[in-house]
Amino acid sequence: MKIYTRTGDKGETSVIGGRVAKDDVRVEAYGTIDELNGFVGQARSLMEDEKFADVREQLLEIQHELFDCGSDLAYVTLSDNNYKVNIEMAERLEDWIDSLESENPALERFILPGGSQLSSVLHVCRTICRRAERRTVTLARNSEVNPEVVIYLNRLSDYFFALARTANTRTGIADVEYVRGKKVFRN
């Protein structure tokens, strides 16, 4: 099987139910999710140490769910039976976030992205996830989309924030606080 089709050579691509321009907001939304998935794969590749076995498996599940998000956004016309992303996925992320946060030191100020290499990549995942969420919200203004995708992406960016902090905690590297800001978090 050849991986090139030549059907996109004129700036259009296929979606489920039609064709759109390659820079269509729908393609931007699921393309950003695809970009995120690539960075999640990079983060997983940095988790060779056994102390990350639990979250390595979580990230594998998230990679599959990101494909589900992209699939849901690729439909031009949806019905409930086409949806793959559901509220239970976001609720499970909340459980994972709570578990991760129980390992992390109390947060008083905003933190700078960074610390360990793994934490840095997870912060990149967080920021790309936020962009994917924004692109999906833009798409939802003018098109029918599964609303659970927006909720999932919102919760997922929180998960990446918590996991980036946990990556630093588990490797013994402190988060770097943004020192020019006031204490904004209350414990």
Image (cartoon, helix red, strand yellow):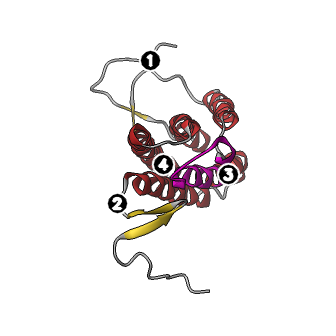
Mark 2 vs mark 1: which is more N-terminal? 2
The magenta segment: 64-82
SS category of the residue bearing label 3: helix
Give the residue drawn at x 66%, y 33%.
87
Question: Is the N terminus in the top left, top right, bottom left or bottom right quadrant?
Answer: bottom right
CA–CA distance in space, label 4 to label 3: 14 Å
- Identity, as a three-letter code, of the amino acid under mark 2: Asp
Mark 4 or mark 2, which has the lower sequence index?
2
Secondary-structure class at tag 2: loop
Query: Where's residue 118, x and y in %?
Result: 52, 51
Say what amino acid the circle numbered 3 marks: Arg
- Please give the label number shown on residue 35: none
The residue indicated by pointer 2 is 23
Determine the CA span between mark 4 and mark 2: 22 Å
Tell which of 89 and 49 is nearer to you.
89
**What crowding class fits label 2: few (fewer than 14 Cα within 10 Å), some (14-19), or many (20 or more)?**
few
Spot occupied by residue 133 in the image (x, y as percentages of width and height) = 45, 41
The residue wearing badge 1 is 185
